[in-house]
Image: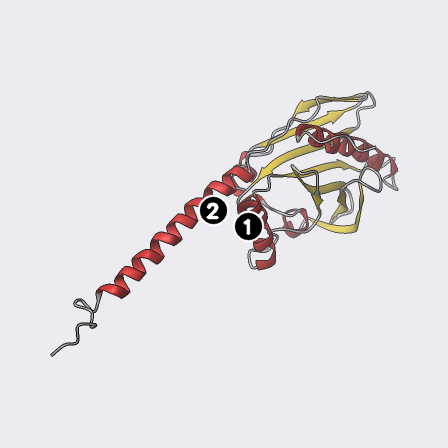
Amino acid sequence: MVPDTAPIFPGRRPLAAMGVAILLVALFGGFASARFRHAGEWVPAIPNTIGHWESIDSPIAAEILEGLGNPPTISKMYVNPLGERVYASVMAVGPFENYHDPMVCIAGGGNFSMTAREIFPLDGPGSGKIRAMIFRRRDGAVRMLMYYWQQSRDGSTDTSARMGNYRDMLARFDTGLGAVVIGRQTCLMRIHAFIRPDDPDGVQAQRNVEEISRTIYQALRRDAGLEPLK
């Protein structure tokens, strides 16, 4: 006699549990995808004019954007009356594929190597920190100064290298935590200029990049409804 407590259909419970697990995974996947999309929807405008600088649109190459998952991007070239140029891009970042650190995509290409790196507050002691880097082409004929940071809608900045290596699980966890759990909206900032031969120490290039970067940093704070820093 089979006890009354025995399941009538012994094989059904594991199947039911598996079905529930699959459903939960699918629901979380849909939730996470929606949160990642939300994280990548903040694309603040940047100024067309900064002091004596006037800007023109300077789109990022389609193949580069495709490799990054085609995130919404604003990219400009600023030119002053002396003919000096500074390039600025604001990229909304949500999914992991949107992140691509310059130390990988520039230095990793083989033509350039990073020769200097420093992290410091961009606009005074109370401001967010940025990462400054100098890249030199292998033949020494071209040098580039770049300011790089991630700026969130809460006004905070982050200079850490994210998604430089797809085996970097800490970066994946931090990105996922911010986008999915916290709902953080973030833009990835790249401001750079090529160092001219008549500026051997890069002093003028740094002055130019810093002026554009500070103004854009404050513009993003205003777009997020935050007060300018004193």
Q: Residue furthest bottom?
A: 1
Which is more toward the observer, 10 or 7? 7
Which is more toward the observer, 100 or 214? 214
Estimate the x, y position of residue 220 in percent, counting from the top left: 69, 31
Residue 104, numbered label? none
Q: In this view, does 25 lie above or below 2?
A: above
Left or right position of 2 against 174:
left
Estimate the x, y position of residue 71 in percent, counting from the top left: 54, 36
The image quadrant where one finds the N terminus is: bottom left
Q: Which of marks 2 and 1 is nearer the N terminus?
A: 2
Identify the residue position indicated by label 1 in the image.
176
**Chosen colour scheme:** secondary structure
Q: Is mark 1 on a helix, strand or loop?
A: helix
User: Which quadrant would residue 213 be assigned to in this image?
Assistant: top right
Please tell me which residue is depicted at 75% across the width and 41% down the height of the picture: 147
Which is more toward the observer, 189 or 121? 121
Q: Can residue 168 be seen in this view?
A: no
Q: How packed is label 1: few (under 14 Cα within 10 Å), some, or many (20 or more)?
A: many
Q: How packed is label 2: few (under 14 Cα within 10 Å), some, or many (20 or more)?
A: some
Identify the residue position indicated by label 2 in the image.
32
User: Which quadrant would residue 13 be assigned to in this image?
Assistant: bottom left
Q: Is mark 2 on a helix, strand or loop?
A: helix
Estimate the x, y position of residue 186 in percent, counting from the top left: 62, 40
Which is more toward the observer, 12 or 134? 12
Q: Can residue 13 be seen in this view?
A: yes
Q: Tag 2: residue type? A: Ala
**Disc 2 + disc 1, Cβ < 8 Å:** yes
Estimate the x, y position of residue 22 in percent, counting from the top left: 34, 55
